[in-house]
Image: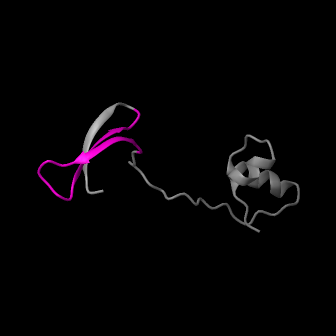
């Protein structure tokens, strides 16, 4: 049976890493076959809140957006 680390944390209070948890479960007789990382493995991704959007003055298919990425407001050009 596959169980996610976060799902298990909803029901049991512990502070161990996934590897430590697997070792402790194995020590009490619950065999853990593997620990797999399932995140996307993305690096350099920045998430920002879109504050405003208006048509680009020189392009029909582009927009000027004002966004806040947590470090400040920025103006970007996008195709959305």
Q: Quadrant of the N terminus?
A: bottom right
In the displayed structure image, the side of residue 78 where residue 3 appears, left or right = right
Query: Outermost residue toward the right?
Result: 28
In the displayed structure image, the side of residue 42 where residue 61 appears, left or right = left
Query: Outermost residue toward the top?
Result: 72
The x, y position of residue 6, in whole percent, is: 69, 51
Residue 74 versus residue 41 in the image, above or below: above
Residue depicted at 25% across the width and 39% down the height: 75
Query: Outermost residue toward the bottom?
Result: 1
Residue 7 versus residue 1 in the image, above or below: above
Residue depicted at 72% across the width and 43% down the height: 16
Residue depicted at 50% across the width and 59% down the height: 40
The x, y position of residue 35, in whole percent, is: 67, 60
Query: Coloring scheme of the render?
Result: one colour
Foreground: 79 or 42? 79
Foreground: 59 or 13? 59
Residue depicted at 75% across the width and 48% down the height: 10
The region drawn magenta spans: 47-70
Q: How many marks?
A: 0
Foreground: 60 or 77? 60
In the displayed structure image, the side of residue 64 where residue 27 appears, left or right = right
> Is residue 56 part of the magenta span, yes or no?
yes
Q: Quadrant of the C terminus?
A: bottom left
The x, y position of residue 55, in whole percent, is: 22, 49
């Amino acid at each position: 049976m596959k169980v996610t680390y976060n799902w298990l944390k909803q029901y049991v209070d512990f502070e161990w890493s996934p590897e430590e948890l697997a070792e402790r479960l194995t020590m009490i007789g619950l065999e853990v076959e593997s620990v797999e990382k399932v995140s996307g493995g993305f690096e350099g991704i920045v998430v920002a809140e879109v504050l405003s959007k208006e048509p680009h003055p020189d392009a029909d298919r582009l927009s000027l957006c004002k966004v806040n990425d947590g470090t400040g407001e920025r103006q970007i050009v996008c195709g959305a």
